[in-house]
Image: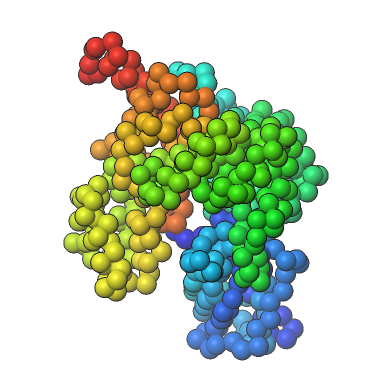
Amino acid sequence: MSLPILLDDALAAAPDGFALRLSLPWIRSLPVASLSDLEVSIDGAAVTDLRSGSDGEWWFLQDRLVVSGPHPLDGGPHEVAVSFRLAIPYLQAGPDAPLTLPFHAQRTLTADAAGPAASAGRRARSAPRKAEPGRDLPSAWALAASAFNWTPEVVRAERSAAEIAVDVVGEGVASVIEIEPGQMWRSFPEPADAEVDVFRASLTAAGGTVSIVGASLDDWASSGRRRDDDERLAFLLPQLRAAHRVGAMGVRLPIGQAGPTLLARLVPVLRELDLVLFEEAQGRQAPSDPDTARALDAIAALDDPHVRVLVDISMLMPALPVSYLAAIEAAGLDRAFVDRVASEWRDPATVGVLMSALRAGEVPPPARALFMDMLVRFGRSDAAVLRDILPLVGGFHLKFWDLDDADRRVSQPIRDLGAALAGTDFAGTLCSEWGGHEWLEADATEMTRRHLALASTALAEGVAQHHDRASGTTMP
């Protein structure tokens, strides 16, 4: 399931034609100027003279961008298609440009159809339950849940992002959460004090705290010009202050994105605000990757507790997710190819197989976005690769894509991680993060609750395994 662009009530009649309300199909707010090459057709006819408008320079994730045109609408359903491109200002496609991605959606819509009623308050829920996972783990290990898991619900905007995040605690899923300011606060990228304070008060009343704030560093300005380090620092500072204000222990950036120069300038600010900057390594970014190794060396050279590594266990996947394999086959990839990557995921030759298929044009357009996950988001390392960097690590993302664990493909990396951490002085969060939104439609609350229970058990088994090995006994 990709994030929606056209919700049920996207189409409306207007005195001079129509209005089309577009949802942002991304995981955080973006500058309005990120949108380009907009095309709309209604009932197969391309609409010319399109006009788009917004309330500001930023397209907040829970808002919809209104596109209007002179095409008159009659009663009844209409076949609506929309396509556009989005520049992602914090992701790089090359030395001189941000990553730009194509999007397309097509739906049968009825003008002025009623959409889901927006809630003025929280949805009805069962009595709050105390979060249980983690009770048998070392006291310095804190299980947490990422509000990112609820991204599809945030995009639907039936409730505010803040309400959704607070209910993660209120519904007993976890008492410690990670948040994304680009999802949470309409005032992003300069979160307003009042907006931050209201959220913190609501979260505290529910019995929750924020562990890490997922900061964003937009390397490119809306004009397409690359920001210099002064501008990059200025972009980050409001997010750091918001993280401090909301009571977080740290902020998170992709590993190596800040770079040594900006990193050195950030350290005094981090000390002043008593924050830790976590540089996150995930997927193919194992410690042996040259770029990752350079970033790790820079962190080690700083030798400052305010800069640490966060490891996403997507780095440690023993096999591809079952639901993902079904999704790429449904998107048009050849069954024999799917079977091969399923059975030979950890074979080093698989990377060559993937690249050959891509270069030969064997990946059908509907499968291209999903296909790239195998090259970027999914890793194939073993937990042993973390041994030498554990002194630098301050947190983990327990990334999961689905909960099909018949062969322990979900739980084994967590179990191995528990064994690797046992006996060390690791103190930090182990956060449940669901990454399967793109192809799997499921209830985020139920998925996260079940995953945290699975993770708690697997970590405890890993700890027991370590102690049994240390004492010379063998796990059954």
Answer yes or no: is residue 120 visible. Answer: no
| Closer to the camera in the image, 216 or 138 | 216
> Residue at the right extreme?
194
Residue 400 to residue 338: above or below: above
Rendering coords of residue 24 (x, y %): 59, 63
Rendering coords of residue 296 (x, y %): 47, 41
Answer yes or no: is residue 393 visible. Answer: yes
Rendering coords of residue 380 (x, y %): 31, 46
| Closer to the camera in the image, 309 or 419 | 309
Quadrant for the N terminus in the image:
bottom left
**Residue appearing at x 64%, y 62% in the figure:** 227
Residue 207 to residue 280: above or below: above
**Residue appearing at x 25%, y 60% in the figure:** 352
In this rendering, position of residue 247 left or right of residue 463? right
Rendering coords of residue 313 (x, y %): 40, 40
In this rendering, position of residue 6 left or right of residue 118? left
**Residue appearing at x 73%, y 42% in the figure:** 241
Asked where in the image residue 212 lies, by quadrant, the reply is top right
Asked where in the image residue 358 lies, by quadrant, the reply is bottom left
Label tally: 0
Quadrant for the C terminus in the image:
top left
In this rendering, position of residue 395 left or right of residue 240? left
**Residue appearing at x 57%, y 27% in the figure:** 129
Residue 159 to residue 446: above or below: below
| Closer to the camera in the image, 71 or 140 | 140
| Closer to the camera in the image, 391 or 100 | 391
In this rendering, position of residue 422 left or right of residue 52? left
Q: How is the image coloured?
A: rainbow
